Image (cartoon, grey):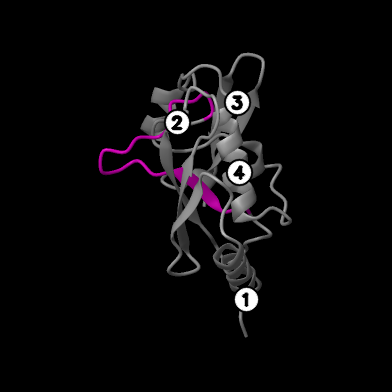
Amino acid sequence: MASISSRRLAKELREIQSEGCPVGISLLEANDFAKWLFTIEVMGDSVYQGEVYTLQFRFDSHYPISSPAVQFVVTDGKEAPIHPHVYSNGHICASILGNEWSPVLSVIAVCVTLQSMLASCKKKERPTDNDRYVRNAPENPKKTLFHYDGEHYNFKSTYLQD
């Protein structure tokens, strides 16, 4: 019997393959139900206009009840976007990846949200605690509990234990 996670991911993959992705989003790899890669290009007039980034999604057996681990890929000369919600190691501080995750959200919905987050940014800058966070960050971004103060772009992070 297939798990809820694998059935849901198979359904999402079928939809992507039959309907395609929204403009600026492309599926690179979905060889299994553990890790998927997408590229997202920021569309429209933005400080990221025309820039393309790679997103990695990792799924555990509790998806879609639990959120995927999502981060920008930082390898082979690629870097994460310089953004107040994105650390230089690719980890993303976004409420939909944490306490505002809902099982009704899909992989494509997350891609579109992150594409919109980049498109609406007015100034390229890293989170204020980028260096400290990257030095101490766990490999899996889901092991971090982010707290965001929207007024000052002041990020605080707590590391979760296994």
How far across and down, in percent of the image, does residue 123 sit? 51, 16
How far across and down, in percent of the image, does residue 89 sit? 39, 36
Dot 3 falls on a residue whose secondary structure is loop
How far across and down, in percent of the image, does residue 67 sit? 62, 52
Q: Are marks 3 and 1 in contact (CB under 8 Å)?
A: no
Distance between mark 1 and mark 2 Cα atoms: 33 Å
Distance between mark 1 and mark 4 Cα atoms: 26 Å
- Label of residue 87 in the image: 2
Q: Are marks 3 and 4 in contact (CB under 8 Å)?
A: no
Which badge, 1 or 4, is on the more N-terminal residue? 1
- Label of residue 120 in the image: 3
Which of labels 4 and 2 is toward the front?
4
The disc labelled 1 sits on which kind of residue? Ser
* Residue 16 visible somewhere in the drawing: yes
Distance between mark 3 and mark 4 Cα atoms: 12 Å
The disc labelled 4 sits on which kind of residue? Val
Residue hosting label 1: 3
Residue hosting label 4: 112
Which badge, 2 or 3, is on the more N-terminal residue? 2
Q: Residues within 10 Å of mark 1 (few under 14, many from 20)?
A: few
Looking at the magenta stretch, what is its main secondary structure?
Answer: loop
Magenta residues span 67-85
Distance between mark 3 and mark 1 Cα atoms: 37 Å
Q: Quadrant of residue 138?
A: top left
Which badge, 4 or 2, is on the more N-terminal residue? 2
